Image: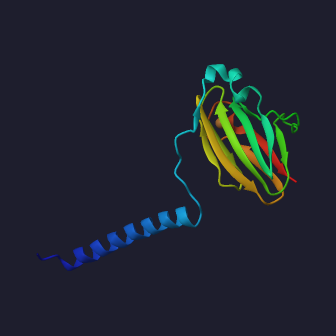
Amino acid sequence: MHIDRLEKYWIVIVAAVLGAFFASLLAAMLVFGLRLPSLPAEFVNPLALSETRFASPGLRDMGDGNYELTLTSLMWRFNTGSSERDADGNDIIRVPRGSRVTFFVTSADVTHGLMVERHNLNIQVIPGHVGRGTIVFNEPGEYKILCHEYCGAGHHRMHATIIVE
Ligand SMILES: [Cu+2]
């Protein structure tokens, strides 16, 4: 079968581009630890959060530098159970350096998002679903927990702060 010279070039270019995409996916998975989002580990009744772990949000010390942070997203704040607030009334959580924090998050109303500044955590917070993810905080500093799903008029103000001491 005759294939035109220019057509051969294009086949090679297309194969090279596909190969580069595949290699970058592999690198993202193997080098940078990127994972596809999975189904939530748990479901809750969003109308009866008072009967679930989300009735008492907060940071729990599980020992050996492990913490569990249970929090609820709602219009328009993160309820982390913390009594410490910033000037805008948003929650502040403090953990020691080196802490391994597992987040458990659900929504009390609409779809929200949860990402932690400069860390590899990005959860879509859907009513009825419990999003879960873990971060190890190796560097001291202040890190914002931000909502990344537009959730209404107060979305741009919706955040909390983690201070790694
Ligand atoms: Cu939002």
Q: Is residue 138 left or right of residue 5?
A: right
Residue 150 vertical position relative to residue 22 in the rendered view, above or below: above
Residue 76 vertical position relative to residue 148 in the rendered view, above or below: above
The quadrant in which the N terminus is found is bottom left
Number of numbered labels in the structure image: 0
Residue 92 vertical position relative to residue 56 in the rendered view, above or below: below
The residue depicted at 82 percent of the width and 37 percent of the height is 91
Q: Is residue 47 left or right of residue 17?
A: right
Quarter of the view holding residue 60: top right
Quarter of the view holding residue 21: bottom left
Q: Residue 79 or 9: which is nearer the viewer?
A: 79
Q: Position of residue 112 (x, y in %)?
A: 62, 35
Q: Position of residue 101 (x, y in %)?
A: 74, 48
The residue depicted at 70 percent of the width and 43 percent of the height is 103
Quarter of the view holding residue 139: bottom right
Query: In this rendering, does residue 158 appear at all?
Result: no
Q: Residue furthest bottom?
A: 5
Q: Give the image quadrant in which the ligand numbered 1 is located.
A: top right
Q: Residue furthest left?
A: 1
The quadrant in which the C terminus is found is bottom right
Q: Position of residue 84 (x, y in %)?
A: 88, 37
The residue depicted at 63 percent of the width and 25 percent of the height is 109
Q: Residue 50 or 88: which is nearer the viewer?
A: 50
**Which color scheme did the rendering employ for the protein?**
rainbow
Q: Residue furthest front?
A: 63
Query: In this rendering, does residue 128 appear at all?
Result: yes
Q: Is residue 19 left or right of residue 121?
A: left
Q: Is residue 37 left or right of residue 99?
A: left
Q: Position of residue 142 (x, y in %)?
A: 82, 52
